[in-house]
C-alpha cells in the first residue's frame, strides 16, 4: 500500500524534526496538508498512521488532515475555479488555456509537542 510508505516517511520526518529541535516529550498533534489532486487518500493515511504509530514518537498523537482544493486558472476569461478533480478546460468558458495551481501537495505542516 502506497500510503504505508508515505506514513513511514512522515514518521521519520517527524522524528528527525523533533531530534533536530532538541525537543523532548511526546508529539500530541500533527497536521498535514494533502491536496485533493495528490492521489493520496486521507482515510488510508489515517489507517496507516494507526498501524505504524505505536512504539514511535507519534504514538497517540492526533492527526489532522487538511485537504486544500486545486485551483483552475483560466488565461481566457480569468476565472479561478476550485477543483476536486483534474480538468482539461475552464469550467466557466470552456477554454483549454488553463493552468492548475496547487492541490497536489503532501506536506507536514505542524508538529505539536507535549514538553514536560
Ligand atoms: Zn475561462
Image: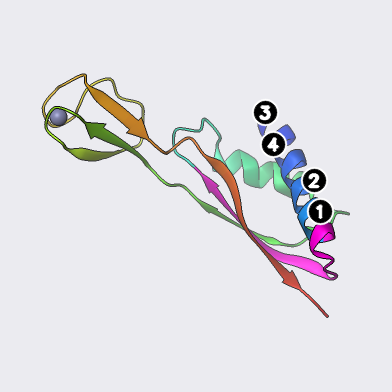
The disc at residue 15 is 1
Residue toward you, 21 or 58: 21
Q: Is residue 24 above or below residue 90?
A: below
Report helix, strand or loop for mark 3: helix
Distance from disc 1 to disc 3, alpha carbons, whole Å, reads: 20 Å
Q: Earlier in the sequence, mark 1 or mark 3?
A: 3
**Can you tell which of label 1 and label 3 is closer to the viewer?**
1
**Can you tell which of label 3 and label 2 is closer to the viewer?**
2
Residue 113 coordinates in the image, percent (x, y):
74, 69
| Crowd around label 3: few <14 · some 14–19 · many ≥20 (10 Å) | few
Q: Residue at x 84, y 71 (%)?
A: 25
The yes-or-no answer for disc 4 within 8 Å of ligand 1 is: no
Residue toward you, 44 or 114: 114
Residue topped by disc 4: 6
Residue 96 in the figure: left or right of residue 56 = left
Distance from disc 4 to disc 3, alpha carbons, whole Å, reads: 7 Å
Number of marks drawn: 4
**Can you tell which of label 4 and label 1 is closer to the viewer?**
1
Residue topped by disc 3: 2
**Whether label 2 touches label 1, CB < 8 Å:** yes
In magenta, the rendered stretch is 19-34
Residue 14 in the figure: left or right of residue 78 = right
**Whether label 4 touches label 1, CB < 8 Å:** no
Distance from disc 4 to disc 1, alpha carbons, whole Å, reads: 14 Å
Q: Residue at x 44, y 38 (%)?
A: 36
Residue 99 coordinates in the image, percent (x, y):
30, 28
The disc at residue 64 is none
Residue 83 coordinates in the image, percent (x, y):
31, 36
The disc at residue 12 is 2
Amino acid at each position: 500500500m502506497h500510503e504505508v510508505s508515505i506514513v513511514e516517511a512522515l514518521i521519520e520526518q517527524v522524528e528527525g524534526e523533533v531530534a533536530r529541535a532538541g525537543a523532548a516529550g511526546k508529539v500530541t498533534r500533527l497536521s498535514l496538508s494533502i491536496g485533493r489532486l495528490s492521489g493520496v487518500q486521507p482515510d488510508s493515511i489515517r489507517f496507516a498512521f494507526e498501524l505504524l504509530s505505536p512504539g514511535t514518537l507519534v504514538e497517540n498523537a492526533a492527526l489532522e488532515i487538511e485537504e486544500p482544493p486545486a485551483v483552475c486558472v483560466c488565461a481566457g476569461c480569468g476565472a479561478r475555479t476550485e477543483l476536486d478533480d483534474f480538468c482539461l478546460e475552464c469550467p466557466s468558458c470552456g477554454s483549454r488555456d488553463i493552468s492548475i495551481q496547487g492541490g497536489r501537495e503532501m506536506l507536514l505542516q505542524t508538529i505539536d509537542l507535549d514538553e514536560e
